Structure formats: structure tokens, C-alpha cells
Amino acid sequence: MEKKFKNNISSIKKIDVLREIFIRVNNTILRNADIQTIGFIPYSWGTKRKTIENNQTQEYCHFPFIAKEYSKKNDYFRKYIASKLREISGLENIEKVYDIKYADIDLFDERHSYFYDRIRTLPVDYKSEAEQLYNKIRYIYTALTQIKIIGETIDYDATIKSINSDAKYIDIPIKDIINDEICLNLSDAYSLEDYQDTNIINSMLDMTPIGGTLTSSGILYANNLFRNNNDDDKEKLMIIISDGVESYDEKYRENPGFYITKKLIDKGMCEKIKDNNIKMIFIAIDYDPEKIQDPRRYIDWKKCVGEDNYYEADNAHQLEVELMGALGVQSSNEVGRNTPK
């Protein structure tokens, strides 16, 4: 969103175009009696939410997915500390681990040779397990490692079942993230869940989302926002705005975190959301999802939301026409259907 449109002479950023559009339609939306609730779920590779706990504001990296093993401590990342190496058979007495804190890069670099030499002496059965654990502990501060851990943590079938019911999701203290690719960390963006707040759009306009892309995290968070609002008799509209494909790195293509959205959609995520009486609209900004030919990564967004609810916007004008049409500010025949204006 921080980049400009590819084929546009103007240097204006896509996020700034989006802000201008919402400013123009803000009053119209708020005057529309048919729009009773508004939510805003910015996402990067994950979402971010604020809560009040013991009169203190807490920020969490929020993944609306079910974990194979739920952690009350929310230590999905923080549990990867050097002392965890002692859980491996043959490393029970390994030294120099207890003074190394979470993501303590300098001490790991200083002691790498010692740790690696100890791991190399292990029998083959334990060596591979130890190496995998050690790499997670040493590189826990990187986005690639955290993406991998989440991909391995998710119970996909349970997540699909949770779309229509209450569940305990994966929440991680934002201080455990460190990098700027995950959960909008180091940005001022966060989810707005105050359904009746008339200032919600103004608050949204001040945000600058940064990071990778995990679209399913935003979609499922929005699904829960609708479901928890308990307005079953009201029409619900979810507008999904994306300016890029799911995060991916060919060099690390075996990382399971790259395929989360694809896997959830293949297991029926979109159909389950529609069962909650939610209409989904997808707007691809300045990119064509259909160009992804790799079957491991290809997502059929048209099938997910419905052919008539899928749009592409290659410039500021298209984006405005299609977004305003989706919000009901313009008649439907003014909304683009994958054709440049």
C-alpha cells in the first residue's frame, strides 16, 4: 500500500488514494441508515488488536486460527529460548543457555560454535530434531522463522469449524514480534472493533499498514467481527482490499506459512463465511492474482467471493469507482468488472 500505482505517472501512494476516497465517501456512509455497523481490519502477515487488561492497554499479534495446542501463556514464539535445547535427548546438560534471553542475537552469535559442535555429536535420530529447534531459537526474530512456526502451529480443520462458532485463537504479545513483516508491527495500524463509533473512518485514515500479506488473517478476523455483533437479520458486507499476492519466497518454498490462505480456502473457508450470511467482495489493487500459475500458490478469488463480486483496479479512478460501488455509494452499473476504465 505504500507504493504508487505501477502504470500511473503520479507519485501518489496507493494508501493515500485509499484515504482520499474514504474522505469523500465518509459522510455519505455515515448518513446511510442501512449501514449500522462498520469495522476496519488492516492486515499484513497477520493482524493486530488492542485490548484492555487490568486497566492497561495490551497489543497482540492476532491470528484468527486454531492452534494444534492452545497456549494460555501466548508463548507461541517466546518459548523458543536457548534453554529449550535441554529438552533434546543428549543435550540435557548443555551449558551456556540460561543467560540467553528470547531473540538474544549477540549471545547466540558468540556461542554458535559451541552449540553447533554439541549438536553435531548427537545420534542421527536426534541431530535433525536438534538442528531444527536450534534454527528456530537462533532465528526467532526473523519473519521467515515466525511465518514457519505459525504455519506449523495451525490446526486447519479446527480453524474451518471455528468460522461458525466461538473459539480460542492464536494471540501473541506484539513485543514478541520484533521484525516489521508480521502483524503490522512497528506500524500505527490496528483493528477497529467499536461497531458504533462514528469516528472509525477518521481513525482508519490515520493508519499506515506495513508488512507482508496473509489475507486469510484479515478475512477471518472480519468474519468474527460480524459474527460477534449478533445481527443475524442484517445484511453483512465484507470488502477485502489487497495490493499483492500472499507472502512468498521461492528460496524457502517449503515454508508452510506461505500457503495458509490457499490451504484454508481449499478446505472451504469462503463457503463457511457465506454460511454466516456474509457477502464478500474482493478488490485487487494494481496486480492480477490470475498470473500466479504455481498450483501450490494459486488462489481462485473469483470462486471464493463469486464472479460478480471480484474486481481489479489498476489506477486511482478504478479503485474509487469500484470501492464506492461496493459501499453502495454509486449504482452497481457504474462498478468496473475487471475492465480498465
Image (cartoon, helix red, strand yellow):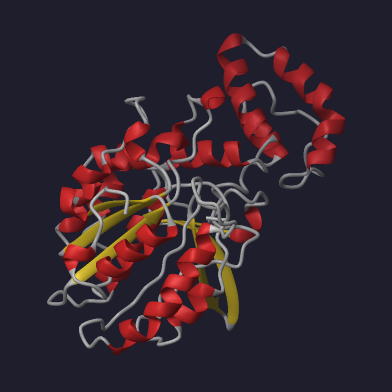
Q: Is residue 32 above or below residue 134?
A: below
- Residue 138 rendering spot, x and y as whole percentages: 71, 35
**Residue 296, located in which quarter of the rendered image?**
top left
Question: 3 or 303, which lies in front?
Answer: 3
Residue displayed at 55% across by 60% down: 209
Give the quadrant of the C terminus.
bottom left
Point 61% across, 30% down: residue: 133
- Report the residue at 87% width, 32% height from top: 110
The x, y position of residue 71, in whole percent, is 48, 53
Residue 309, by quadrant, is bottom left
Residue 14's x, y, as percent? 51, 58
**Considering depth in this image, is 206 or 265 the residue closer to the camera?**
206
Extreme residue toward the top, this view: 124
Q: Quadrant of residue 12?
A: bottom right
Is the residue 261 above or below the residue 217 in the image? above
Q: Position of residue 142 (x, y in %)?
A: 65, 40
Task: Say above or below: 86 vs 211.
Answer: above
Q: Residue at x 42, y 45 (%)?
A: 69
| Along the line of sight, the residue nearer the viewer: 201 or 135 | 201
Viewer-closest of 154 and 218: 218
State the count of labels: 0
| Residue 4 visible here | yes
- Which residue is outermost to the right? 110
The answer to whether any part of residue 223 appears in the image is no
